[in-house]
Amino acid sequence: MHTLSHTYFIAKALGDIDVSFLEEAIAFPPKKVQTSLPKRLAAACLCLLIGVASLCTISFPAEENPASIDSEASPTPTPEPSQSVSGVTPPAPQLSLAAGENADMMPFFIYQGRTYLYYDCVPSRHLALGEKAGTATGLIDEWTPQDGYVNLAGSVTGDFYPVAGYDPSFLLAMPQTDGTMELFVAQNGYTLQTGADLFETRLSVLETCTAVTWETWDSWYEEKGDIHTLSTENTAAFSSFLGVLEQSPCCLTESIPLIDGAESVYDFFFDDWGLYRLYIARDDGITVELCLFEGGYVMFSGLQSVCVQVPPDDFSALLALLS
């Protein structure tokens, strides 16, 4: 099993920082920890120590996506990122490091053309696994050449399995020696049209929800741990919101209109538009974490390249439950 931390993976910046790298980096705040749950990674990215920690996207060259290269069999085609009336295709994670940088990579592995990124670590007692799907080799680091991004390669090592009740093309688990399981979410290789394609088909949130807790964005950012539990009298209203969420359209996060002065959606989305973090406990011990942003945008923290935009009135009704 791999020995990477379950929290942020801080990289050491050595030498001068390439300006183009900084311009492309996702500007996440330095402190983003859910205190009542195991710490989870904030994005599919590397973390660089440049005064404060900043997150950037994982970058593979578009002309030859290494996640689709299989050294043992024919590669599974990886759709190009797109957004149309038929839905959105999440882009393959991109890894971009300036020359001379030294970094610990985020936990991920490649399987059947998909890049699976670490999401959470949970107790294994309620999860049933299928037959072993493969073994991640852990052969990738920040210096791995493009032809090293082959099937089963990654930054972690270990056997991984499908989880009962989940599509293995979306979620796989890697058992740990301490009795827990690390969950990995596929970042590409499928198309989402509405929230139902994510929250119903792949996460079954409405059918399996046992409890809902939440905190303000400030509480999460400042690690205050000011967690609230959704009251019983608001359960029906929240279920109604989940129904609306499943009917609402998906969009690529990068397609969200920019505000004045912003060069990237990440310049303002996480710093200025964050409102609440919701933690939906499933009956199998997995927690589905939702990020709520101004504009009615809702994001599953395990797939940050995609958002669902909820109608204004329904979004306001949810905020009223949390205020």
Image (cartoon, rainbow, N blue to C red):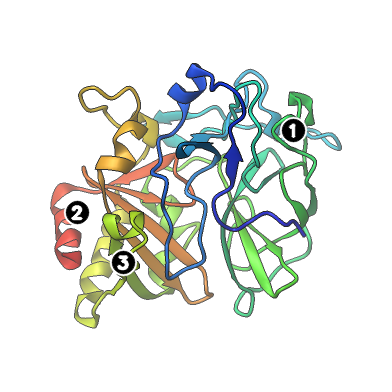
Q: Quadrant of residue 101?
A: top right
Which residue is more in the foreground, 105 or 172?
A: 105
Label located before the other in sequence (2 or 1): 1
Residue on which the image places disc 3? 214
The three-letter code of the residue at mark 2 reads Phe
- Residue found at x 73% / y 50%: 156
Residue on which the image places disc 2? 315
CB-based contact (under 8 Å), mark 2 and mark 3: no
Q: Residue furthest right?
A: 72
Quarter that holds the C terminus: bottom left
Instruction: In the rendered structure, find residue 149 and report the number of the disc placed on it.
Output: 1
Tell me how far mark 3 sits from mark 1, CA to CA.
38 Å
Label located before the other in sequence (2 or 3): 3
Label located before the other in sequence (3 or 1): 1
Would residue 176 be found to the left or right of residue 276 on screen?
right
Question: How busy is the neighbourhood of tag 3: few (under 14 within 10 Å), some, or many (20 plus)?
Answer: many
Which residue is more in the foreground, 75 or 300?
A: 300
Q: Quadrant of residue 218?
A: bottom left
- Residue found at x 86% / y 37%: 72
- Residue found at x 33% / y 31%: 267
Image location (x, y in percent) of residue 312: 15, 48
Would residue 109 be found to the left or right of residue 320 on screen?
right
